[in-house]
Image (tube, helix red, strand yellow):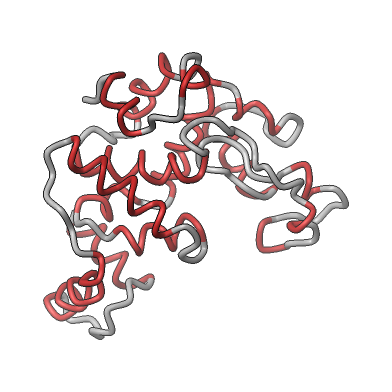
């Protein structure tokens, strides 16, 4: 598993803001089976980018941009602001808060700020990670695909990549050329009788998780 010293080398700007979170981080990772070097490196790279190295448990923007976003479950006036990004993974929207709350036994509709607290924050991020089946992607180093699933696009990919590279080096893992990810995915698709377009869509992801 990961030590506090290793974690702080992965997120050198975390400083004292990490202190209240640290006692809950390793138990949350263990509970979510994020326990191999590949999984830890990928999870913490994404968390570092999304949370500014565990310094921000709530999205800096006010959330008004999410107002009326029915794809996020924001169907009531004020939902955009109330359910802006929270936790190290910036869980966003009424629907995601509700699902996370059910999984963790928290009423996040009444109080979405609960997952900004140290005792719940990393557990919420782990819930999000596992609800999207991201351990399977970490196992095969599909980091760009993982970023798309977390972010909805590739915002901050370069920054996420820098964290990932550093985390992998600290955990003794080899360098991965992300420019080859599409080729690797296409090879997997051919092997599993799928259309080899190099894009990990629902059928490819289903096959990957079945093969895990």
Q: Residue at x 23, y 84 (%)?
A: 196
Q: Residue at x 50, y 58 (%)?
A: 151
Front in this rendered view, residue 168 or 193: 168
Percent x, y of residue 173: 13, 44
Residue 1 higher or lower than 72, as above or below? above
Q: What quarter of the picture does the N terminus occupy?
A: top left
Residue 87's image quarter? top right
29 to the left or right of 50: left
Q: Residue at x 28, y 34 (%)?
A: 33
126 to the left or right of 109: left
Percent x, y of residue 132: 42, 52
Percent x, y of residue 123: 46, 29
Question: Tag count in the figure?
Answer: 0
166 to the left or right of 46: left
Q: Residue at x 16, y 75 (%)?
A: 192
19 to the left or right of 99: left
Residue 116 higher or lower than 142, as above or below? above
């Amino acid at each position: 598993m990961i030590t506090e010293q290793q974690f702080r080398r992965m997120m050198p700007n975390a400083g004292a803001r990490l202190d209240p979170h640290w006692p809950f981080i390793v138990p949350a990772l263990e509970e979510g089976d994020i326990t191999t070097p590949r999984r830890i490196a990928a999870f913490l790279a994404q968390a570092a980018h999304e949370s500014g190295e565990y310094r921000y448990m709530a999205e800096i923007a006010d959330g008004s941009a999410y107002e009326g976003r029915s794809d996020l479950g924001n169907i009531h006036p004020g939902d955009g602001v109330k359910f802006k990004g929270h936790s190290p993974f910036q869980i966003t929207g009424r629907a995601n808060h509700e699902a996370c709350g059910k999984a963790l036994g928290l009423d996040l509709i009444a109080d979405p700020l609960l997952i900004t607290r140290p005792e719940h924050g990393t557990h919420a991020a782990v819930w999000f990670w596992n609800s999207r089946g991201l351990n399977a992607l970490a196992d095969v180093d599909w980091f760009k695909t993982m970023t798309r699933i977390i972010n909805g696009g590739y915002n901050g990919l370069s920054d996420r990549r820098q964290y990932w590279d550093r985390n992998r080096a600290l955990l003794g893992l080899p360098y991965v050329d992300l420019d080859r990810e599409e080729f690797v995915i296409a090879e997997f698709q051919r092997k599993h009788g799928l259309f080899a377009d190099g894009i990990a869509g629902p059928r490819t992801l289903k096959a990957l998780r079945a093969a895990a």
